[in-house]
Image: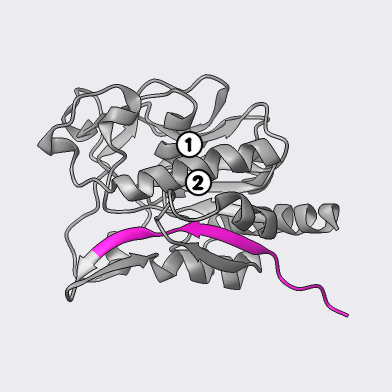
Amino acid sequence: MTAASPLVAVPADIRDFQNYRWHASPDTYLKALLRVAGATPVIVPAMAEEIDLAAILDRVDGVMTTGSASNVHPARYGAEPSPCYEPFDTDRDDLTDGLIREALRRGLPLLAICRGHQELNVAFGGTLATEIQEIDGRMDHRAITHEDQRERYATRHEVAVTAGGLLASIVGTPAIRVNSLHRQAIDRLGDGLTVEASAPDGTVEAISVASAKSFVLGVQWHPEFWAETDAPSAAIFEAFGAACRSYRDGRG
């Protein structure tokens, strides 16, 4: 009998349109989980105060936090709100903070992408810098304006992969090309986090948790977009899927 695919909790973003409030997640992340990680996504509504997160995490085998157009609210890392930090999604902030902390406590595999990578840093007491393209010596990491998503999400630059780290063990090379699309990035690294990759301008592009009981990786770029065709992107999702299956089998 073939084992069922592992279940992965994916936090929803709040979107308001057509006179409804939607709890949604981009399908690129969901397809990468299904087609490459071999896992089944379970979208968790951004209603942290009304749902039983513990009951959900009792039933899943991993957590994936996604990218989003919104940014982590500055109050969560000791900064003053400003229009340049917007838009915000405080309902998602509440949800992902609980998911990340509880996943780490339980030893659930965690893959944190883009906004999720920043959320992971904030959960460990780190801070974020916004509009980094305006900082002297920094590259412009923002997506280009183009009607074709494949052009917007094309790989733009290399990142140096930390030798001997988790990411190095996954991708097997000292450098990879990535589609790192953002205007906000890690400023002060959270306590207990390890840098797994950096951009040529010093931007922290990937992190792991030194004390993690299982697979925990944060990446600033978007491996989900090319997971079916790009070897490093596929390797990240395959490694996450394997960790989720191991967690599922271990608790059985």
Residue 242, above or below 190: below
From what the image shows, is residue 91 above or below residue 201? Answer: below
Nearest the eye: 165 or 246: 246
- State which tag comes first along the sequence, 1 or 2: 2
Magenta includes 11? yes
Front-most of 11 and 140? 11
Quarter that holds the C terminus: bottom right
Q: Is residue 229 visible?
A: no
Residue 58 against residue 19 in the figure, above or below: above
What residue span does the magenta drawing correspond to? 1-15
Q: Which mark is residue 120?
A: 1
Graded by Cα atoms within 10 Å as few (under 14), some (14 to 19) or many (20 or more), the crowding at tag 2 reads many
Residue 208 magenta: no
Quarter of the image where one finds residue 169: top right
Quarter assignment of residue 74 = top left
Mark 2 residue type:
Ala
Q: Quadrant of the N terminus?
A: bottom right
Describe the element under mark 1 as helix, strand or loop: helix
Q: Position of residue 7 (x, y in %)?
A: 65, 64
Horizontal arrangement in the rendering, residue 21 relative to residue 222 (left or right):
left
From the viewer's perspective, tell me whether residue 25 is left or right of residue 120: left
Q: CA distance from mark 1 to mark 2?
A: 7 Å
Look at mark 2 in the image and give the residue it sits on.
112
Q: Position of residue 174 (x, y in %)?
A: 58, 37
Q: Is residue 185 above or below residue 127?
A: below
Q: For the residues labelled 1 and 2, say whether their Cβ atoms are less than 8 Å apart.
A: yes
Please report the residue visible at 30 percent of the width from the left and 68 percent of the height from the top: 22
Q: Which amino acid, by three-letter code, is at mark 1?
A: Leu
Residue 96 at least partly seen = yes
Q: Quadrant of residue 115?
A: top left
